[in-house]
Image (cartoon, rainbow, N blue to C red):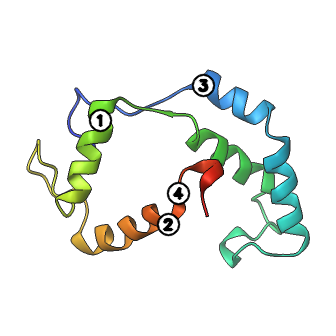
């Protein structure tokens, strides 16, 4: 979605470790949600998955690295209904874009979301 090999999306290991090591509030909220069983069924923690696995995945997604160019191409791809303006490739359906954009709008920005 972000273009070609010149517009990479990466992962920052040191940011992930920092997120994971300083996430007391996130862990607290997750365990409080678990106590009252407010997770959807896909987050059943009665088997191989654990709440910690979910938290670690969240911390990893918080550590994605990108560039302004990559994000602008991604935004242009969404604005173009899923068609990448650089490559001309359809990377997602218009229907998926139709559901993605309102979700992004209502999510806000981290501490100011809601």
* Residue 106 circle label: 2
- Is 23 above or below relative to 107? above
* Residue located beneath label 4 in the image: 108
Q: Nearer the viewer, mark 1 or mark 3?
A: 1
Label 3 and label 2: CA atoms lie apart by 29 Å
Q: Name which of mark 4 and mark 1 comes first in the sequence.
A: 1
Q: Residue furthest top?
A: 14
Q: Residues within 10 Å of mark 1 (few under 14, many from 20)?
A: some
Q: Are marks 4 and 2 in contact (CB under 8 Å)?
A: yes
Q: Say if mark 4 contacts mark 3, CB within 8 Å.
A: no
Most extreme residue toward the left is 88
- What's the CA distance linking mark 4 and mark 3? 25 Å
Question: Circle 2 sits in a helix, a strand or a loop, which is it?
Answer: helix
Judge whether residue 1 can be spotted in this image. Answer: no
Q: Residues within 10 Å of mark 2 (few under 14, many from 20)?
A: few
Q: Which residue does the image show at 21% across and 50% down from the upper left? A: 76
Q: Quadrant of residue 39?
A: bottom right
Residue 72 point in image, percent of width and height = 27, 40
Report which quarter residue 60 is drawn in. top right
**Residue 21: x percent and y percent?**
80, 31
Check the picture and name the quadrant holding the C terminus: bottom right
Neighbours of disc 4 within 10 Å: few (<14), some (14-19), many (20+): few
Name the N-terminal-most of marks 4 and 3: 3
């Amino acid at each position: 979605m972000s273009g070609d090999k010149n517009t990479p999306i990466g992962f920052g290991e040191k940011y992930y470790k920092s997120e994971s090591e300083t996430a007391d509030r996130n862990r607290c909220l997750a365990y409080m949600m678990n106590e009252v069983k407010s997770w959807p069924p896909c987050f059943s923690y009665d088997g191989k998955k654990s709440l910690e696995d979910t938290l670690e995945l969240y911390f990893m997604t918080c550590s994605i690295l990108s560039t302004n160019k990559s994000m602008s191409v991604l935004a242009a791809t969404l604005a173009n209904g899923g068609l990448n303006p650089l490559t001309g490739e359809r990377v997602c359906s218009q229907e998926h874009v139709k559901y993605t954009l309102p979700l992004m709008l209502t999510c806000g920005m981290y501490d100011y979301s809601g």
